């Protein structure tokens, strides 16, 4: 079965010298990659990369830690870009209390505004949440109560079981990355074991979060099988069954044909 890496930052400078090799090493069996943006310039680069490969798609969005890094990172320019280039998802967006690059009230402002853009263009959202669950979940619950369901993904999920259950109740998918394979990460594996297989995705978050046995090295889409194998063991299902369900889930949430 093909695999969909639902979150990779192929525009990262770590791929400047060998992007073609990195991408083409993941082309077997009709695999797909979503090249995820972190700002306006990043969105442009992701669009360019996707145009070069038929199996690479792209998102557009402004990461909470990127809001103040470039004056181009405005909601107005993002709106124009989405209308013109037509990404398949809006992200990476969200909230982050781990780093203080952007004032938190401004993070909330951008997050809400980008959710509204996603509704305007009927796009799923790719959500970043780091040390901000107590802020994120009430905000999303209010959004759903006022305006209806949100279609999207909690990327690189690392929350607890309560967080997982609340996200799934909101209609969101949970995407697991290489941390699931780390030897001391039993807590995350216990959470994954209780998640319905119909609401799970996998990703690399490349070039970050490389799985075992590549931890600490540059991550690549081709490493995703290590996370899939770990997830199959956790859920006690065959690789074939899991890969089939992941393919269905990935394409469903991203509005693509299977």
Image: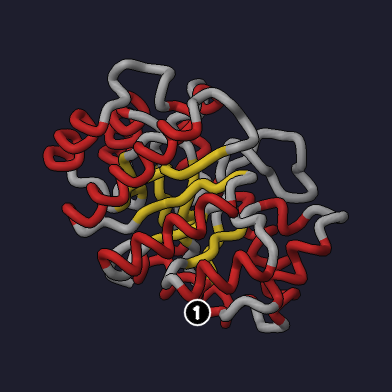
Rendered view: 71 above or below 191: above
Q: Residue at x 56, y 79 (%)?
A: 197
Q: Is residue 139 left or right of residue 97?
A: left
Q: Nearer the viewer, residue 191 or 241?
A: 191
Q: Is residue 66 left or right of residue 147?
A: right
In the rendered image, is residue 201 in sight?
A: yes
Q: Position of residue 45 (x, y in %)?
A: 33, 29
Q: Is residue 191 above or below residue 70?
A: below
Q: With 110 as the anchor, is 127 left or right in this view?
A: right
Number of on-image labels: 1
Residue 49 at x, y percent in the picture:
34, 35
Vertical position of residue 122 compared to residue 42: above or below: below
- 141 on left or right of 191: left
Instruction: Tell me the crowding category of disc 1: few under 14, some 14 to 19, or many 20 or more residues within 10 angstroms, Cα based.
Output: some
Which residue reaches farthest right? 184
Q: Position of residue 48 (x, y in %)?
A: 28, 32
> What residue is drawn where x is 71% and y is 76%?
193
> What residue is drawn where x is 49% and y is 26%?
102
- Colour style of the rendered protein structure: secondary structure
Determine the image quadrant of residue 187: bottom right
Q: Quadrant of the C terminus?
A: bottom left
Residue 11's spot in the image, x, y percent?
43, 30
Q: What is the secondary structure assignment of the residue under circle 1?
A: helix
The residue located at (14%, 34%) in the rendering is: 80
Residue 58 visible in the snapshot: no
- Give the residue pinned by disc 1: 198
**Within the image, what quadrant is residue 185 found in?**
bottom right
Q: Nearer the viewer, residue 149 or 134?
A: 134
Residue 239 sits in quarter: bottom right
């Amino acid at each position: 079965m093909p695999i969909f890496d639902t979150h990779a930052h192929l525009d990262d400078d770590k791929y400047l010298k060998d992007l073609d090799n990195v991408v083409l090493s993941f082309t077997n069996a009709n695999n797909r990659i979503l090249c995820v943006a972190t700002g306006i310039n990043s969105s442009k680069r992701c669009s360019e990369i996707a145009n070069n490969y038929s199996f690479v798609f792209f998102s557009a969005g402004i990461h909470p830690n990127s809001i103040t890094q470039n004056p181009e990172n405005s909601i107005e320019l993002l709106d124009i870009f989405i209308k013109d280039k037509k990404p398949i998802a809006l992200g990476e967006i969200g909230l982050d209390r781990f780093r203080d690059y952007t004032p938190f009230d401004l993070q909330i402002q951008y997050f809400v505004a980008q959710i509204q853009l996603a509704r305007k263009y009927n796009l799923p959202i790719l959500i970043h949440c780091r040390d901000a669950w107590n802020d994120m979940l009430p905000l999303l619950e209010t959004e759903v109560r006022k305006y209806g369901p949100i279609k999207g993904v909690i990327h690189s999920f690392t929350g607890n079981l309560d967080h997982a259950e609340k996200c799934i109740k909101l209609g969101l998918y949970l995407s697991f990355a290489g941390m699931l394979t780390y030897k001391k990460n039993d807590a995350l594996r216990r959470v994954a074991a209780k998640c319905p297989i119909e609401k799970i995705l996998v990703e690399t978050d490349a070039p970050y979060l490389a799985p075992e046995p590549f931890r600490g090295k540059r991550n690549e889409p081709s490493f995703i099988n290590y996370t899939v194998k770990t997830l199959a063991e956790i859920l006690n299902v065959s690789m074939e069954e899991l890969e089939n369900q992941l393919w269905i889930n990935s394409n469903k949430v991203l509005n693509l044909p299977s």
